[in-house]
Image (cartoon, grey):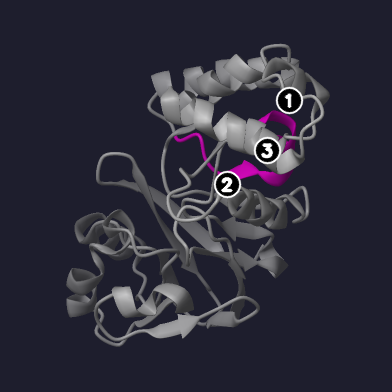
């Protein structure tokens, strides 16, 4: 791995993340939920912000950008093409297949509509890093606000197809609640049972539960496991399309 990563808390349950290229000194923030923690982390690391990689337009992901740009006015702000008109300030719009350079590091853009219609994620393929915003969470996924459920299912399949050892950074610390919900739809999953216990211990110690990995999500995240026979039986949709099973699991989480 050539990228250096710093993860820290913002707002009530958001994560801030910095991605640094030591070869060039370039540094990207993945979203800016809140300015003060991002600026503090940059000062602590001695890094200069050169880029902001925005996943979607929600205020808890972009609200701190104007204040951060006062300290780093030359930083480039990369935003989803489909949401560019809804994000204030100067920015560069990106879409599926575009590559954003952070120094020598290269982030590939994948469009993942569902949580919002224009949501995107960033994949640093060489370092096997995924910054998933609010599309994929540890043992969870974002609430589907702006598209049919099958659109979100298709978006999640794009991420599920990444290399299994890809590290996944998400926008929020929702892991424990997600794990407890996952047990309601797949209580027989022994790996899930073990993981929830591990997450309970991490949260009790005040430690982060992220990053996760694609392989671990494929084994324990019910929103990626619609083809699983046990989940299908538990939600009463043995013969339904995968997208319909996903939609039922998401609706159960919504009601929870």
Answer few, some or many: residues within 10 Å of disc 2's Cα (few below 14, many 20 plus, some between 14 and 19).
many
Per the image, the residue denoted by label 1 is: 237
Per the image, the residue denoted by label 2 is: 149
Q: Secondary structure at mark 2?
A: helix
Choose the circle earlier in sequence order: 2 or 1: 2
Task: Answer with left or right where residue 76 lies relative to residue 183.
Answer: left
**Bounds of the magenta segment:** 208-221
Instruction: Name the spot of residue 135 as percent of width and height, x first.
Output: 53, 51
**Are dots 1 and 3 in contact, CB under 8 Å?**
yes
When the figure is inspected, residue 78 is found, relative to residue 241, above or below; the finding is: below
Q: Secondary structure at mark 3?
A: helix
Q: Quadrant of the C terminus?
A: top left
Q: Looking at the image, which is closer to me, 31 or 72?
A: 31
Instruction: Name the spot of residue 192 as percent of width and height, x first.
Output: 67, 21
- The residue under the point 72% across, 50% down is 160
- Whether residue 139 is visible: no
Q: Secondary structure at mark 1?
A: loop
Per the image, the residue denoted by label 3 is: 244
Task: Answer with left or right where residue 107 lies relative to residue 53.
Answer: right
CA separation, marks 3 and 2? Answer: 8 Å
Answer few, some or many: residues within 10 Å of disc 1's Cα (few below 14, many 20 plus, some between 14 and 19).
some
| Residue placed furthest toward the top | 188
Residue 30, picture quadrant: bottom left
- The residue under the point 67% across, 44% down is 213
- The residue under the point 25% across, 58% down is 40
Instruction: Name the spot of residue 105 as percent of width and height, x first.
Output: 60, 76
């Amino acid at each position: 791995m050539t990228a250096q990563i710093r993860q820290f808390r913002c707002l009530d349950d958001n994560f801030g993340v910095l991605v640094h290229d030591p070869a060039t000194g370039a540094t990207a923030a993945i979203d800016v939920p809140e300015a003060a923690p991002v600026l503090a982390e940059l000062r602590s690391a001695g890094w200069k912000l050169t880029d902001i990689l925005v996943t979607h337009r929600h205020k808890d992901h972009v609200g701190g950008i104007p204040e951060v740009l006062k300290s780093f006015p030359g930083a480039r702000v990369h935003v989803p093409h489909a949401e560019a008109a809804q994000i204030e300030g100067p920015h560069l719009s990106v879409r599926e297949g575009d590559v954003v350079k952070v120094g020598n590091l290269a982030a590939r853009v994948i469009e993942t509509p569902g949580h919002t219609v224009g949501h995107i994620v960033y994949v640093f393929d060489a370092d096997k890093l995924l910054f998933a915003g609010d599309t994929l969470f540890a043992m969870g996924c974002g609430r589907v606000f702006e598209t049919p459920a099958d659109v979100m299912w298709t978006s999640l399949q794009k991420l599920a197809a990444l290399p299994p050892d890809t590290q996944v950074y998400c926008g929020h610390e929702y892991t424990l609640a997600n794990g407890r919900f996952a047990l309601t739809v797949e209580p027989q999953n022994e790996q899930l049972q073990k993981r929830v216990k591990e997450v309970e211990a991490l949260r009790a110690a005040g430690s982060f539960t992220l990053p996760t990995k694609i392989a671990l999500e494929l084994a324990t995240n019910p929103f990626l496991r619609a083809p699983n026979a046990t989940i299908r039986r538990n939600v009463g949709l043995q013969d339904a399309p995968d997208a319909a099973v996903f939609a039922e699991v998401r609706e159960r989480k919504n009601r929870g």
